Image: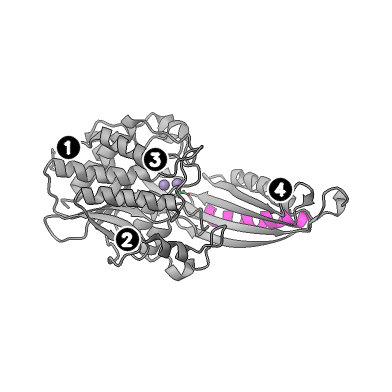
């Protein structure tokens, strides 16, 4: 490490215990669910604030309910920020996002217990609504608001399936605050990989070089509801069939586009949604991601064309709404080198790779030098109850985070 021989370690058992405690919030038959600003998300936020206060951190929230705990530095300077998110998808594992926030807290505990002061303040942050699933407002909403990529007003009409808007849920949360927007000197995010690369390569640490371009589109199909028994096949305008054939065509398109492009129709609704009615309406969300900007742009256009073709083939009208379009990020060389060097100093094998998952880091990299640290996801599974990372791997990545932080905080 640059002129530094102090290598600290986190308290791995305490990190693991806290992960499990947070993981019990919103737990159900399959995994846990803490969609943004739901009671379960608010309960997790309250636990996080309690832990921050017990650590003696100065707790802040901004107008977007982003929460951070600040540890003073020797000098009043822009802080080093470490963090991620604690909201989850539905039926989630217990590591996505949470590992990064709780490892940030654990890094602060390690500094406190070692009696180490840092030149710069350190902030541990949890961003609002990183997953985006509840309101289909797109992902990384809290960090995009903090970075000024979107305005609060744009979220007024984003509503969940019960008609509650993002703004209403934010105001009801009780976590909006007046702290001025955080302007980091540098940002570090530690996260599970959520794919199979590190397991395939047998590496302990992922040195993340950048994050994928990401988009969400919502297609609405307008056909004709009819009697499932009496209405002849050849005269139907079946919206559900059009949506299903669009899903198949989009899957084919992902392979044609190549360059690591992925297309997922994760959410499909058809109405009136009863066994004996030909669906008159259908809604399909399409998550399209690609690493190469030009493939991403052409993929978006081709996806729309493919869906329109399938709708026409079934005599169905279709409209499209772009829910979110997020350019990817490439992290600063000096930051990826810091992660790689730190992993090496801790005798941890590492592998340079991009992230196919979106992260707040791709937003924060627009504000300051940013790095991400990955640990392996067993069998590459995530966004499901089966998501798992061993305690040993989870702790190893937290040690890398702690020592990267230590070096940056003396910058
Ligand atoms: O969708 C994503 O990539 C992230 O999990 N929000
Ligand atoms: Mn995440
Ligand atoms: Mn996620």
Q: Position of residue 326 (x, y in %)?
A: 47, 58
Query: Does dot 4 land on a helix, a strand or a loop?
Result: helix
Crowding at mark 2 (Cα within 10 Å: few <14, some 14-19, many 20+) = some
Q: Residue at x 51, y 53 (%)?
A: 133
Q: Residue at x 50, y 42 (%)?
A: 91
Q: Is residue 162 left or right of residue 271?
A: left
For residue 7, which numbered disc appears in the image?
1
Query: Label 2, on which residue?
Result: 367
- Using the numbered discs, state the Cα–Cα distance from disc 3 to disc 2 in whole angstroms: 31 Å
The answer to the question of whether label 4 and label 3 lie on touching residues, with beta carbons closer than 8 A, is no
- Is the CB atom of the residue marked by disc 3 within 8 angstroms of ligand 2's nearest atom? no
Q: Mark 3 or mark 1: name the one nearer the start of the chain.
A: 1
Q: Mark 3 or mark 2: name the one nearer the start of the chain.
A: 3
Q: Residue at x 73, y 56 (%)?
A: 311
For residue 292, which numbered disc appears in the image?
none
Q: Position of residue 410 (x, y in %)?
A: 15, 51
């Amino acid at each position: 490490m640059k002129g530094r021989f102090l290598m600290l370690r986190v308290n791995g058992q305490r990190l693991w215990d806290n992960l499990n405690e947070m993981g019990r919030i919103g737990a159900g038959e399959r995994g846990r669910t803490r969609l943004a600003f739901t009671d379960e998300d608010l309960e997790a936020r309250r636990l996080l604030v309690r832990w921050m206060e017990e650590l003696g951190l100065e707790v802040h929230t901004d107008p977007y309910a982003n929460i951070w705990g600040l540890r003073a530095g020797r000098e009043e300077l822009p802080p080093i920020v470490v963090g991620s998110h604690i909201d989850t998808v539905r039926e989630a594992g217990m590591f996505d996002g949470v590992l990064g926030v709780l490892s940030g807290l654990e890094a602060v505990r390690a500094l406190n217990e070692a009696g180490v002061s840092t030149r710069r303040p350190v902030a541990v942050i949890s961003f609002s609504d990183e997953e985006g699933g509840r309101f289909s407002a797109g992902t990384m909403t809290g960090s995009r608001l903090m970075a000024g990529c979107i305005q609060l007003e744009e979220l007024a009409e984003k509503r969940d399936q019960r008609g509650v808007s993002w703004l209403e849920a934010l105001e009801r949360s009780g976590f909006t605050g007046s702290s001025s927007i955080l302007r980091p000197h540098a940002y570090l995010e530690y996260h599970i990989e959520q794919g199979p690369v590190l397991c395939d390569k047998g590496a302990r640490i992922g040195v993340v070089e950048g994050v994928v371009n990401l988009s969400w589109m919502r297609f609405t199909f307008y056909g004709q509801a009819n009697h499932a028994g009496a209405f002849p096949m050849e005269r139907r305008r079946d919206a559900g069939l059009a949506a299903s054939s669009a899903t198949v065509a989009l899957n084919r398109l992902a392979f044609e586009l190549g360059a690591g492009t992925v297309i997922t129709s994760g959410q499909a609704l058809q109405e009136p949604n009863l066994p004996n009615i030909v669906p008159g309406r259908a809604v399909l969300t399409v998550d399209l991601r690609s690493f190469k900007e030009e493939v991403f742009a052409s993929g978006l256009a081709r996806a729309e064309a493919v869906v329109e073709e399938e709708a026409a083939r079934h005599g169905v009208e279709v409209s499209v709404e772009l829910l979110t379009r997020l350019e990817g990020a490439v992290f600063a060389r000096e930051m990826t080198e810091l992660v790689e060097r730190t992993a090496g100093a801790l005798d941890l094998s590492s592998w340079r790779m991009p992230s196919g998952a979106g992260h707040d880091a791709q937003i924060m990299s627009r504000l300051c030098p940013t790095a991400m640290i990955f640990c392996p996801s067993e069998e590459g599974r995530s966004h499901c109850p089966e998501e798992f990372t061993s305690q040993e791997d989870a702790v190893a990545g937290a040690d890398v985070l702690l020592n990267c932080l230590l070096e940056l905080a003396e910058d």
